[in-house]
Amino acid sequence: MSRVFVAIILFCLLIPVDGRSQSSAQPAAPVYVYHPPGEDKASWQRLHLWMSETFLVVAKEGQADHDSCMYVASRSIGISRFHILAEGIDDPGLFEQSTWIDQRDPGKGIRSLSAATGRAHLQWLILLGAYYAFEPGNYRRYRDSVEYFLSRAINESKSLKEEKLGRQAQCLLGKVYIQANDEKGDAISDALIRQCRQAGDKETEARILAYRGIYKPPLPSTLEQKMTDLKAAASLYLTLGNKEGAINVLTDLGYLQMITGQLQSGYERLLEAYGLAQAIGFPYTHYSTQALATATIYQGKFGEPWRYVYQTIKTAEITRDSLAWGYFYTSLALLLGSEGRDKESAAMAQKSVDRFVADRNTSVYNILNDVVDYMGQEGRAKEALALTQDIANKVGFPANFSEQFFYHFVFSNCYLNLKMPDEAEMHINKLDSLEAKAAVFRGPLRRSAINVQFASLFLLRKQYQKARAYFEEQIIAPTIDGATLPSQLHTYRSLIFIDSVLADHTAAVAHYKKYTQLLDSSFKIAKIRQAEELQVVYQMNEKESQIRSLTQEAKLEKANSEKAALVRNLTIIGILAAIIIAGLLYRQNRLKQRNNQVITGKNEQLQQLLSDKEWLLKEVHHRVKNNLQIVMSLLDSQSEYINNDAALAAIEDNMRRIHAMALIHQKLYQSEDISTISMPQYINELVSYVHDSFDTGSRIKFEQVVEPMDLDVSQAVPLGLIINESVVNAIKYAFPDGRKGVVSIQLYHDGPDHLVLKITDNGAGLPPGLNTKAHTSLGLDLIQGLARQLNGRLSFENSNGLHITIRFMVLSSLFSHRSLVNS
């Protein structure tokens, strides 16, 4: 059922099918070779960030702000935001001093500002203003900071006669007000455009026009102005030869034209941007081809969407830009579903779900509908609900209206498939409420989907008249999500069923006629699609035939020529062949030597890096141990001035706890293995220290049975603290009035994946009626909390003394178990 509506997922992506044939062939995708994006020239890094940020804004249906998406894209693809913030400053040396931008530590930038003078001081003012101007929520949270730095920059540019830098500061100041749709933004922009035209500064003029076209909120009153500004910016960028800038604004313009129904114009602008990207050899064209896939789907084409989606996935995987893999896989899943290739579509949808879950991306709920729908058709509705609940626990509840809608949509489908109408109704009512709120600012985009959910609910309850009313509303006034052919076919099938149940034969005949007309339309579309596929195959066969013919002719011509000149040229050819072979052998040998040198050098560098890393980690453990010992010394010094016995005892207890942790870091520093602890030696030294810190003499004996094992430090620390607390409690309370006793510590394997820690004594045990789960003492609370940290099962047994048992999973087994669950 949900397959009819999941096509809304990407860029409000809907799949209209109207039977139009595809256009002529488009440029083929080049083959790209991977290299880190951070090694690209600055203009490419800037364009890569713009394109990925724009994609995220569109994918989130405009419910995530540009600056937040820019930050997410920057972290995902490994490109500094500096290239966006510093555009127009043009000082290459500034980049090395600006790591604070991506660390989000403007304090470092302010310190650099204080040390700078002259033009450098002005540049730092602009860069700090740009930092706050591109921070998420800049108008509400950082407007004062933006105005402070950029106003100073504008004034300083006048005294230094750096007019162009002053115009860049005005451009950034205008951006903040433009984003908030504050009228001050237009005033600053218009004044700046006049200044740029008087000074002949087309670069800054293009930038402020691009900012206004990109950042002004897309409202009915602003859309025309946005498109006008983007067209003007594109023209200026092309005049300047700045193809990267033109690609960016043409892409935004194409999206806006599609949103406003100018499908052909939007397609042409996107195709123009894609052509420019290919012309300059820009490798990250997957955002352009994804936009073209969306445009051609809107236009009802068949072949082009497939080509562009496959090309998008191929390019994104080759360039290793994983930011949008989940969305790209979603597009392919939806195209497969539109062709009726349900099994392939479900497999690709599952791949998309896995990617979204790995990224903790709440966009997962839309494509999850496809998976749930397919599982429901296979009779696995209960399994589908369990999967949805598990994903919801991992990914969390979405923050924006669109993703909240699909969250409730997928749960409503799960409960409808399980024939649980009350649970389904709760989520459908949520859908209705969310759509009512969202429709206020973007129209009733998904009303048809909600109508079908209500209709399915009433069908499940056998309230056929109510169900029919919703289905008929879907026919009379469908929103864009219900205007697809599959959706209409589903609606008429449901109405025919209801007419049959209600014995309304007149309505059944009318609905059946409409249904057959739609089926006929679907059949014609299928035939058109088949004809196009045959045409593509025919063209490919023709090209292969021509290639074979030309190859054969070339071979015959070459054979005749060689035969005629064989005698005359035999000696010369032999000599040339010998020279060429010798040269190739020599070149191959040199290349091999050079490659061996490079590999040897790389191996030496890697070995040195590994040694440095191990040394640094050891140094960290050594310093942590020293710091913990300093803390112990401070506590010891403090205890000299304390007369309160309870406070003194608390300090001594904490010193023992700190020693348990310090001993871990000492062992790591002294060991060749810097990640695991030898437990027999560690426990022996820990118990000896605790024993020595109490004046018990030989009254209390300690028995240790610890299997040889090395544990990860993340498990060794809580184990050490548990042993410390248990032994201290036994010494303090288990043997009152000078009684003698034995404390036993055992650590052993319980099966291949689990360990058991037992700490027992033959002392007085716990007081009768003591509830160990209540907060009775810090020691017991610590033991319980540390056991939870180990994901272990803790038990107390009060029989002939106290017996503490903790059973927990070995860390390596725990990771293996979690990876199996996630896969």
Image (tube, rainbow, N blue to C red):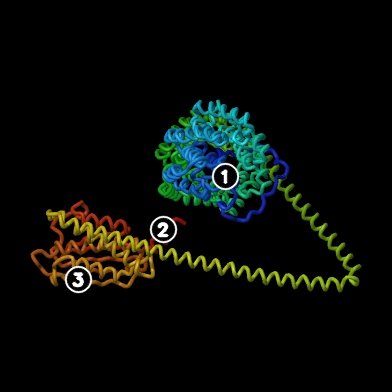
Q: What is the x, y in percent for residue 227?
A: 61, 31
Q: Residue at x 55, y 29 (%)?
A: 189
In the rendered image of this protein, does residue 783 appear above or below residue 443?
Answer: below
Q: Residue at x 14, y 63 (%)?
A: 734
In the rendered image of this protein, does residue 1 appear above or below residue 310?
Answer: above
- Say which label, 3 or 2, has the lower sequence index: 3
Q: Quadrant location of residue 645?
A: bottom left
Q: Residues within 10 Å of mark 1 (few under 14, many from 20)?
A: many
Q: What is the x, y in percent for residue 44?
A: 60, 47
Circle 1 is placed at which residue position? 46
Report the disc number at residue 818: 2
Report the disc number at residue 5: none
Q: Residue at x 85, y 71 (%)?
A: 572
Q: Secondary structure at mark 1?
A: helix
Q: Are marks 1 and 2 in contact (CB under 8 Å)?
A: no
In the rendered image of this protein, does residue 135 appear above or below residue 772?
Answer: above
Q: For the residue marked with disc 1, what is the amino acid?
A: Arg
User: Alpha carbon of mark 1 to alpha carbon of mark 3: how far?
Assistant: 67 Å
Q: What is the x, y in percent for residue 281?
A: 66, 49
Circle 3 is placed at which residue position? 702
- Say which label, 1 or 3, has the lower sequence index: 1
